[in-house]
Every structure is written in structure tokens, then in C-alpha cells.
Image (cartoon, rainbow, N blue to C red):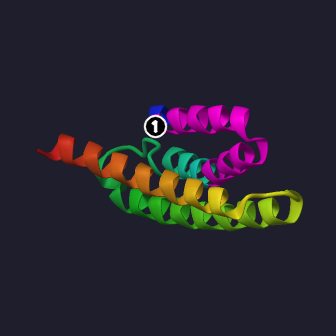
């Protein structure tokens, strides 16, 4: 997942070299997707101590999802309040692409480990 996000940031950074507003908007969109996703991964997948702790693990995942949702909303609000010249199409395309791509990477990783 980290490699996927790194590649997205490199692509948006190179776009920034050609068109500053477009590249920065794409960087913001990727960041709004990647930061809550990384927070979710860190918070929900900490080691909790085995099968006896399965209820705690489920609760940790619910808490992580809530934190991810609230952080995503806060980051959207922060970007729209603080960034004056944003290219909305680039921002939303980058956010959706990063979000969808992260979901596909996760699904492929899970399928590889199950099969």
C-alpha cells in the first residue's frame, strides 16, 4: 500500500512540474485519501494478542473506521477552507483514484493470501 501511495505522490509531483495548480490539487486529493487510510491501517491492525482478543480486534476496526471517516471529513473541510486556487476536477479525480486504487490493492492482497 505504501508503494502505491508513493507512486501516486510521485505522479502528482511530476504533474506539478508542468502545471502547478493542477499538480497541487492532485497532491491534495491524494493526501486526503492516503492520510486517513494510513491512520486506519495503523490503528486497526495493531497486534492485540490472539484469538481471545477477537472482540477487541473488531472494536478496534470499528474505531479505526470512525477515525478514518472523521479525518477524511476534516481534511476535506481544511482543503476547501485553506486552499484558495484549487482545480476541483483534479482534486476529486486524484481523491477517487487514490481511494479506488487503495481498495483494489487491498482486495488483491487479501485474495493472494486467501488463495
Residue at far left of view: 115
Q: What is the x, y in percent for residue 12?
A: 62, 39
Q: What is the x, y in percent for residue 45?
A: 44, 46
Q: What is the x, y in percent for residue 85?
A: 85, 57
Which residue corresponds to the image point at 46% horizontal and 37% vertical from the top-left?
4
Q: What is the x, y in percent for residue 68?
A: 58, 60
106 displayed left or right of 86:
left
Residue at the disc numbered 1:
4
**Please, what is the dominant secondary structure of the magenta stretch?**
helix
Which residue corresponds to the image point at 51% horizontal and 33% vertical from the top-left?
7
99 displayed left or right of 106:
right
Q: Residues within 10 Å of mark 1 (few under 14, many from 20)?
A: few
Q: Where the N terminus falls, by quadrant?
A: top left
Instruction: Verify whether residue 90 appears in magenta.
Output: no
- Residue placed most toward the observer, 55 or 65: 65
- Determine which quarter of the picture holds residue 49: top left
Residue stretch in magenta: 4-32
11 displayed left or right of 109:
right
57 displayed left or right of 74:
left
Instruction: Verify whether residue 25 appears in magenta.
Output: yes
- Residue placed most toward the observer, 4 or 72: 4
Which residue corresponds to the image point at 72% horizontal and 32% vertical from the top-left?
17
Q: Where the C terminus falls, by quadrant?
A: top left
Total number of numbered discs in the rendering:
1
- Residue placed most toward the observer, 68 or 89: 89
Residue at far front of view: 18
Q: With respect to residue 15, does 87 lie above or below?
A: below
Considering the numbered disc 1 on the image, is that residue within a helix, a strand or a loop?
Answer: helix
Which residue corresponds to the image point at 29% horizontal and 52% vertical from the top-left?
107
Amino acid at each position: 500500500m505504501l508503494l502505491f501511495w508513493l507512486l501516486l505522490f510521485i505522479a502528482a509531483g511530476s504533474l506539478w512540474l508542468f502545471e502547478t495548480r493542477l499538480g497541487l490539487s492532485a497532491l491534495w486529493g491524494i493526501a486526503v485519501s492516503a492520510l486517513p487510510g494510513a491512520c486506519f491501517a495503523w490503528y486497526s491492525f495493531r497486534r492485540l494478542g490472539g484469538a481471545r482478543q477477537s472482540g477487541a480486534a473488531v472494536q478496534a476496526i470499528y474505531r479505526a473506521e470512525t477515525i478514518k471517516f472523521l479525518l477524511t471529513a476534516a481534511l476535506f473541510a481544511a482543503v476547501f477552507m485553506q486552499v484558495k486556487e484549487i482545480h476541483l476536477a483534479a482534486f476529486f479525480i486524484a481523491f477517487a483514484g487514490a481511494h479506488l486504487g487503495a481498495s483494489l490493492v487491498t482486495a488483491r492482497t487479501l485474495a493472494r493470501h486467501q488463495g
